[in-house]
């Protein structure tokens, strides 16, 4: 950033490095500078919203996700992140609306189906979850599916899904 203070990827990467190190305050400083320099960049708000959510500051995370959606309504990741935040707060109606929006915005991508399927599964709606997981699997590259299926889903869900989806 010293060489080129307007090089966007540097802010994103540095902010995420601090987030991974759980230095949330420093991540927020870096991402806030990113927003100061590029106030119309939806990714800046989305990334800072993610850090705020990890820090437990729900109101600031929600404000940043809302701004990211305002700036980039076609980015399904912003709806997914806000849906996860709503879900973690027990606001299932809003979470469900956002997970549906992820699929509406990007019906050609596998991850929105995976995210909504995980939400359905958590709500005990296994038939709907299974339909979304099958769609996700159909759209994903095999190595992507394996990576996310194995790493993200809780082991007990993965084991039960193996019964429902032979050769998952």
Image (cartoon, grey):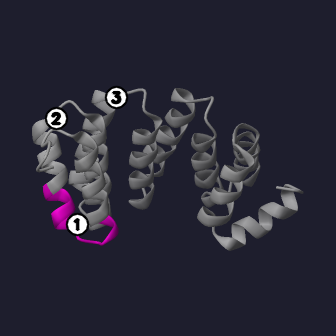
Q: Are marks 1 and 3 in contact (CB under 8 Å)?
A: no
Q: Which residue is mark 3?
A: 72
Q: Is residue 135 left or right of residue 102?
A: right
The image position of residue 147, as x and y in percent, is 65, 59
What residue is rendered at 74% in x and 45% in y? 137
> Along the line of sight, which residue is nearer the eye, 126 or 18?
18
Q: Residue furthest right?
A: 166
What residue is rendered at 25% in x and 36% in y? 67
Instruction: Determine the secondary structure under disc 2.
Output: loop
Q: CA distance from mark 1 to mark 3?
A: 24 Å
Other residues around mark 3 within 10 Å, as few (<14) / some (14–19) / many (≥20)? some
Q: Which residue is mark 1?
A: 24
**Which quarter of the figure has residue 55?**
bottom left
Look at the image and give the residue range highlighted in magenta. 19-29
Q: CA distance from mark 1 to mark 2?
A: 20 Å
Task: Note whether 115 is above or below 163 in the view shown.
Answer: above
The image position of residue 150, as x and y in percent, is 68, 64
Secondary structure mostly seen in the magenta stretch? helix
Q: Are marks 1 and 2 in contact (CB under 8 Å)?
A: no
Counting residues from the start of the chain, the first of labels 1 and 2 encountered is 1
The image position of residue 125, as x and y in percent, is 69, 53
Q: CA distance from mark 3 to mark 2?
A: 14 Å
Counting residues from the start of the chain, the first of labels 1 and 3 encountered is 1
The image position of residue 168, as x and y in percent, is 82, 55
């Amino acid at each position: 950033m010293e060489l080129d203070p307007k090089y966007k990827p540097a802010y994103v990467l540095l902010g995420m490095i601090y987030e991974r190190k759980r230095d949330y305050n420093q991540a927020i400083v870096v991402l806030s500078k990113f927003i100061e320099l590029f106030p119309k960049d939806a990714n800046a708000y989305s990334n800072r919203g993610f850090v705020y959510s990890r820090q437990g500051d729900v109101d600031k995370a929600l404000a940043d996700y809302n701004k990211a959606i305002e700036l980039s309504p076609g980015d399904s990741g912003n709806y997914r992140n806000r849906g996860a935040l709503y879900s973690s707060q027990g606001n299932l109606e809003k979470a469900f609306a956002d997970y549906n929006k992820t699929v509406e915005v990007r019906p050609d991508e596998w991850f929105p189906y995976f995210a909504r399927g995980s939400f359905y599964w958590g709500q005990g709606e296994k038939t709907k979850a299974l339909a979304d997981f099958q769609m996700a699997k159909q759209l994903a590259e095999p190595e992507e599916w394996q990576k996310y299926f194995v790493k993200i889903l809780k082991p007990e869900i993965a084991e039960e899904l193996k019964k429902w989806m032979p050769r998952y």
